[in-house]
Amino acid sequence: MGCIYALIALGLSIIFGVMNIVNFAHGDFVMLSMYFTFWAGTLLGLEGVWTPLLTFPLLFLIGILTYRAIVERTLRQHYVTQIAVTVGLQLFLRAFTQIVWQAQPRALPYSIIQGQFMIGEYQIILSRLISAIVSVIAIVIVYLFLTKTWPGRAIQAASDDLDAAALVGVNYKRTYALAFGLGSALTAIAGGLLMTFQQVDPTMGMRFGLLSWCVLALAGLGSIPGLLISGVIVGGAESLSMALWDPRARSLVVYLIFILVLWVKPRGLFGRK
Amino acid sequence: MKPIRLTIKLVWILVGLAIALLIPALLGSSQYNMVLVTTVLLYAVMATAWNIIGGMAGQMDLAATAYLGLGAFTTGTLLIRWNVSPWIGMILGGFVAAGFAAFVGYSLFRFGVTEVWYALSSSALIEVLRVIFLLWEDVGGPVEKFLPFYSWSLYHMRFGSYVPYYYIMLALLLIALFVNYRIAKSKLGYYLIALGENEDAAEVLGVDARACKLKALMIYAFLVGVTGGVYACLYGFIHPNIFSGLKGTEVAILGIVGGMGIIYGPLLATLILVSGREFLRSNLSGQLESLYLAIYAVVLILIVLFRPKGIATLFQDIYENILSRIARGKNVQTNTPSL
């Protein structure tokens, strides 16, 4: 679970870290991609694990469209305006999914990666294990993309110093669009993985959005390994508080950690900025 | 020119007040409509109070429902357990909310949590409170706690009709507007606007930013907390779901869309957007349940994209335009004979 959170937060950190765009609708992109996964699973009979092949480009496209239509106009605006716009987007996505898929929770009927096995005393659910592995692989690929390829390094350069990057020939408009698209597309993988063991309903977006901000706050900006660790911390805190205390207390513990970290270490545990 | 403007302004305020006072007479026959207008007023009070911390001080507080819920729970619990009148309870609720705001605000401002992170932590706060009240069975718990029912009791603030609630809400709205007005004209108001524009610069010039922000936050929390008391009586029950993150954000959005720092901006935005939304909701239900929400969201986005300074500025522009045209027209008329 934690690794998936890290994956979602990675998308957010690309969007926020590079462009300084406050995206409150990120969690709703996760929800949207979960619904797309549901569609791909029921209409096309596709397996949950393979749906990202389809939804990844789709979300990438939606991300770029969103960027061009809405976000680009608010680039030079106050962050307050960005919050307002993305909350509007959040409401829209929520309403959209309610219209198309109705309000009741949806789940995929089956998955090849079901089942569980035991390691010592601990019961491991196979779909969760595989999801964790896939998320880590995806994170590593994105990490390599950001550090080793030209467009990836352009994104990094823009995040460090936009003017300097523009001087050495980075087309920031295209870079921004790419970054927003990539950030949104990463939710497609997360959505596909989440659907293998969870159901989806339209109100989920808000929770995932806030959770990914928590992970990001914990990790600080610009550290991908930090994201992974923070994701695991958040996921672990959730499961532990559910197991040891009360199932309803899971968000309480996570948000308390979030607020404490903001108080004590405003730059996050692994931040570089 | 100036005194004329002032009287025009006064006329506007009186006309608005008259309409507000007459609404129950026009809609009073339908309780459903009364709930709707009272809900609109509820949002208006919260958004107007939000203007103090959000609009003037520029702090993106998304936790309006946290203070609303604290006020509601204080009032509701006092009434259910000790039969304390909500009239007292709502004031106490306001103090509880303000006290909580002082605690949270002090620590957040002390550690320099700003901008986005302030917004996010206030949003997280709602969820924290919701879970705490969900777990705290004596006061909250997963089952609704109903307030004692009376068909008409002033002491218990329980009325068989929604009309009294409407007037109470209206009174709260006027108080909130008045507080806004007084703050805007005071030293604190100027400090807040200064630090809302640029906190560092304001601090250099000797504004104690932390203390000012804290004061603004507490005033806002008190107003919303008192409103929470009325909210509890209006709906007749208290439940942890009052702590709704989305609604808290919505209040802030209404404040932004209305025009940050413009006193009547949030009110205007609420009147247009929330009434529009509720109108759509009651007319479109049936085939497409959530269509109203989609339309509402699109309108929101469009307003923010094309009027980032708020709809109040749009009205101001149009209004100024008309005024200057009238003035010009008058000049032309008075000038022609002499020519």
Image (cartoon, helix red, strand yellow):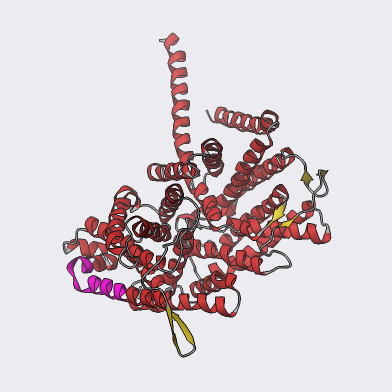
Q: Nearer the viewer, residue B322 or B244?
A: B244
Residue B185 seen in this snapshot? no
Residue that sits furthest to the bottom in the current view: A120
Q: Position of residue A240 (x, y in %)?
A: 53, 79
On the image, the x and y values in percent for residue B330 come to 47, 18
State whether residue B261 is above or below residue A23: above
Q: Is residue A15 left or right of residue B179?
A: left
The part of the image, by quadrant, that contains residue B302 is top left
Q: Quadrant of the C terminus of chain A?
A: bottom left
Does residue A2 appear in the picture of this structure?
yes
Q: Which residues are magenta?
A: A137-153
Q: Residue at x 57, y 57 (%)?
A: B244
* Front one among B255 and A255: A255
Query: Can you say whether B40 is above or below B336 in the image?
Result: below
Where B327 sits versus A271, above or below?
Answer: above
Horizontal relation, residue A190 to residue B82: left or right: left
